[in-house]
Amino acid sequence: MASEIKSDKVNMKALAKVLNVSIATVSKALRDSHDIGPETKLRVIEEARKLNYVPNPYASSLRKKASNTIAIIIPEIADSFFSQAINGIESVVAIKKYHTLIYLTHDSYEREAYMFGELASGRVDGVIMSVASNTEDTKHIKTLQDSGIPIVFFDRVFDDIKSVKITTDDFNSAYTATNHLLDAGCKNISLITIKGYPSILSAREEGYQQALAEKGIHPRESSVVTCSNKYNNENVEVIKEHLAKVKPDGIIATVEHLATSTYLACDEMKLNIPKDVKVACFTNQITAPILNPPLTTILQPAYDMGKQAAQLLFDHLSGRYVETNKEIVLPSKLVVRASTAFN
């Protein structure tokens, strides 16, 4: 294979092809990065010597020129969770004297993929992100990784992407919330969720299903309601229809904006919370204690997730060794309030 490449065409891309590794791996190996193991480094260096590979000094200087900027890519800013996560990220960024660019995907895969195309130009040194709920194809993410830009995920992650991930215990959180409703006397609990692929959604549904199964309860297919990932009146109508048809006595909402939709739906149908239906929600919204009635919440450690994500990204940027597929799971907390009070 090596003999098929002409000496004047030996660039990093050709070298990566010969070695059957990514361009990013070759680049890191030649820069003696801590991310690459000694065996791989030796293999890359020996092949580069064999092919008389000469680095492009101009391209190298461009790559080494730091922008002192990182990108934060999130689905939305209205959600209290993401606002608190940004505060956690900024607590680290400010000390490092870096700048941040905040990109809102509005929970759209198309917008997310477009943004990654812009970032590939070297505009930022690293990325901290939570993926859009309808992102299934991760090619744009892997392409940016292959260009040498480190990416740290928090909250919404993809298991098939090798990267640092900061998550919370979504399965256990939903499991605990479901058991809380069962202990409060609920016998027909529904899960209100959104369309999407991120692992947090499936983990929350699995925790809900497991808690019911352990009590010998087998929910009907109609007990899981899928709403839009947007803030709109359509969700209120979907939940009203579900309340009228299935008549649940307990509801767990998997994302913040569905708590508002659930409260509005119950109000329009003259259903009393918690007498007629008890409600718990995954949310960090600061208004939860002053809702009528105060909302029982699964409180996620958003600030700490953002802070740890930033710390790990800067560890990578400073050359410290960071495990390629490191995953940190932080515990969430069930905060019980009047919306799930025992009748």
Image (spheres, grey):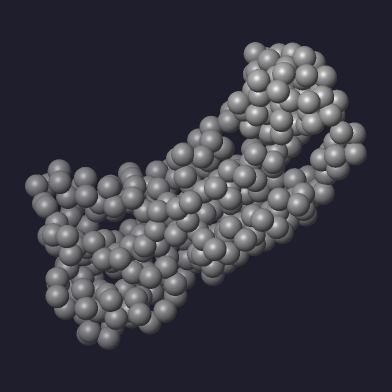
Instruction: Classify 23 as above or below 178.
Output: above
Residue 73: name its quadrant. Answer: bottom right
Residue 97 on image: x %, y %: 81, 49
How many marks can you see?
Answer: 0
Q: Is residue 123 visible?
A: yes
Which residue is found at the position 42% from the left and 68% from the top?
229
Q: Taking 48 as reference, is 56 left or right?
A: right
Residue 138 on image: x %, y %: 52, 48
Which residue is found at the position 21% from the left and 50% from the top?
209
Q: Quadrant of the C terminus?
A: bottom left
Residue 86 on image: x %, y %: 62, 57
Which residue is found at the position 54% from the left and 63% from the top?
110
Task: Pick whichever, 334 or 132, lies toward us.
Answer: 132
Residue 282 on image: x %, y %: 39, 59
Residue 41: name its quadrant. Answer: top right
Task: Pick whichever, 137 or 283, lies toward us.
Answer: 137
Instruction: Classify 130 as above or below 39.
Output: below
Q: Quadrant of the N terminus?
A: top right
In the rendered image, the residue lying farthest to the left is 216
